[in-house]
Amino acid sequence: MRYPNIHCGGGRLPEALGMPRVVIFVLLGLVSWQSFAASPLDLSRRDALAIAEREIKAQGIDLKRYKLSKFPQELSADRNEWTFYYQCTPDPIPPGCFFWLSVNRITGVAKYFPGE
């Protein structure tokens, strides 16, 4: 079987690499798949908030007693994590009556951080 005249440094590409073209395409496909598989879940705010609320319930917290407050930057600078901040209701908020959760956009794992 002859390969087309794809030149690479003075030789034909498949022959220069010592591999049939099919093997090259399979390897390129695997590299592309690995890049795709390693990409973040890219969780939307709504999806991350749903994960956070499941974690809150798992912690035994009654969300009726809290309100979602504005966090200065819900999405981290590296865009890998959402952070949601909850405060007690009604105002005024007693000291330590808050908590926050972070949701990793790559793994979808939520972490709970209690108030102090």
Image (cartoon, rainbow, N blue to C red):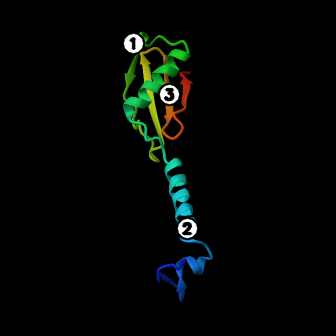
Cβ atoms under marks 2 and 3 closer than 8 Å? no
Q: Earlier in the sequence, mark 2 or mark 1?
A: 2
On-image quarter of the C terminus: top right
Q: Nearer the viewer, residue 113 or 19?
A: 19
Mark 2, mark 3: which one is toward the viewer?
Answer: 2
* Disc on the earlier residue, 3 or 1: 1
What residue lies at 54% left-to-right and 37% top-to-bottom? 107
- Label 2 sits on residue: 24
Mark whose residue sits in front, 3 or 1: 3
Q: Position of residue 12 (x, y in %)?
A: 53, 83
Percent x, y of residue 92: 39, 14
- Judged from the image, the secondary structure of the residue bearing numbered disc 2 is helix
Mark 2 vs 3, N-terminal side? 2
The disc labelled 3 sits on which kind of residue?
Leu
Dot 1 amino acid type: Thr
Identify the residue position indicated by label 1 in the image. 89
Instruction: Report the amino acid beneath label 2.
Output: Ile
- Does residue 81 appear in this view? yes
**Contact, CB < 8 Å: mark 3 with mark 1?**
no
Please name the residue that numbered disc 3 is placed on.
101
Please, is residue 69 above or below residue 32 in the view? above
| Relative image position of residue 63 (x, y in whole percent) | 44, 13
**Depth check, front residue: 108 or 26:** 26
Name the disc covering residue 71, or none: none
Residue 106 appears left or right of 89:
right
> Callout 3: helix, strand or loop?
strand
Tag 1 secondary structure: loop
